[in-house]
Amino acid sequence: MDGLDAGIAEVRGWLAAARGVAVLTGAGVSAESRIPTFRTSPEELDGFVDDDEDGGAWDSMKALWARFDPATLATPEAYRRDPAMVSRWYDWRRVMCLRAEPNPGHLALAALQRAVEGRGGRFGLITQNVDGLHQRAGSTGVIELHGSIHAWRGIESGRAAAFGEGPIGEYPPTVPGSDEIARPGVVWFGEMLPDAAVRSAAAVTDEADVFLTIGTSAEVYPAAGFIGRARDAGAKTVEVNPEATAASREVDVVLRGAGGEVMPKLVSRAV
Ligand code: BJW
């Protein structure tokens, strides 16, 4: 048995005995669904984004991801400065998320929820992702700390703006039936996280006997703070990630591998 298998066996034992399980996910969970993370390098982008789609018309969006630190696009200031460019970038990502499929990591988390809740335990899935793939994999009650790329709203009124499955095509888009500019319903740097989501995340963290952090660099707060909060409350903490992160040294067990490979092993015939 190698180190990874031994770690998986140990964590399976914890999950089987746990009454409360909480999970924090980040962009890495969706990497195997071909959605780039915030750290995917320009050279790697070709493996993620299909060049042929949209007849290459959206190549400029890919170039944008390659040239800029995406964090500089994920701010209210960037939207105010250039709403046409930033909304186009978000719409490109929105359509990419709609076309993506949940991967074995997402599916394993939905199975883990069914197993834990099926035996009367408590399960909470806290995600920083805005792509909606956990819900499409069958997870319920997902706590979206950073909002959703599918829920656009008016920048003044907050009125919901629903768009179809193809590109919106008008940038910046307006709330249908009005001339108010719409923005994606995500949380940008410097913005407050939704109150209810933060409260729910704190509650499931405090009730957890086992806390898994999967596919996040653990560098963005307050989300990353839930890992330390879980440990301080006495939970066993586990990281699933192919790379070392800011959390690696503070968790009890590190499972060094991709979410889509490790999670199915952790959950199969689990728990
Ligand atoms: C795999 C894999 C595979 C690859 N399998 N893994 C405390 C200290 C310092 C600063 C702050 C603090 N508290 C707040 C701040 C400020 C700021 C912050 O955190 N800054 C840091 C950069 C230092 N936080 C905020 O501004 C937050 N708001 C806030 O705190 O409000 C109160 C306040 C207001 C005003 C002033 C001060 C306080 C808001 C944060 C919003 C983050 N928004 C974004 C964009 C969302 C919209 C969009 O999608 O465009 O959220 S930024 C981006 O980062 C996105 C992500 O959800 C988030 C986290 O990234 P994540 O998920 O970890 O992804 P990556 O790419 O970083 O990592 C991927 C990982 O996957 C890697 O580790 C890979 O190895 C791994 N991986 N393949 C498993 N197959």
Image (cartoon, rainbow, N blue to C red):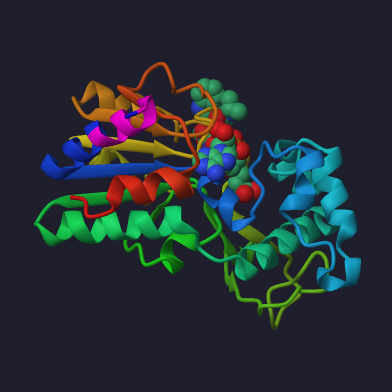
| Nearer to me, 140 or 88 | 140
Q: Position of residue 191 (x, y in %)?
A: 57, 41
The residue segment tinted magenta is: 2-9
Q: Residue furthest bottom?
A: 177
Q: Quadrant of ligand 1?
A: top right
| Nearer to me, 211 or 14 | 14
Left of 180 or right of it: where is 139? left
Q: Quadrant of residue 240?
A: top left
Residue 192 showing in the rendered view? no
Q: Residue furthest top?
A: 249
Left of 159 or right of it: where is 59? right
Q: Position of residue 192 (x, y in %)?
A: 51, 41
Q: Residue furthest front?
A: 1
Q: Is residue 6 magenta?
A: yes
Residue 150 showing in the rendered view? yes
* Residue in the picture at 51% in, 36% down: 216
| Nearer to me, 63 or 5 | 5
Q: Position of residue 24 (x, y in %)?
A: 39, 41
* Residue in the picture at 44% in, 21% down: 248
* Residue in the picture at 82% in, 74% down: 169
Q: Is residue 232 magenta?
A: no
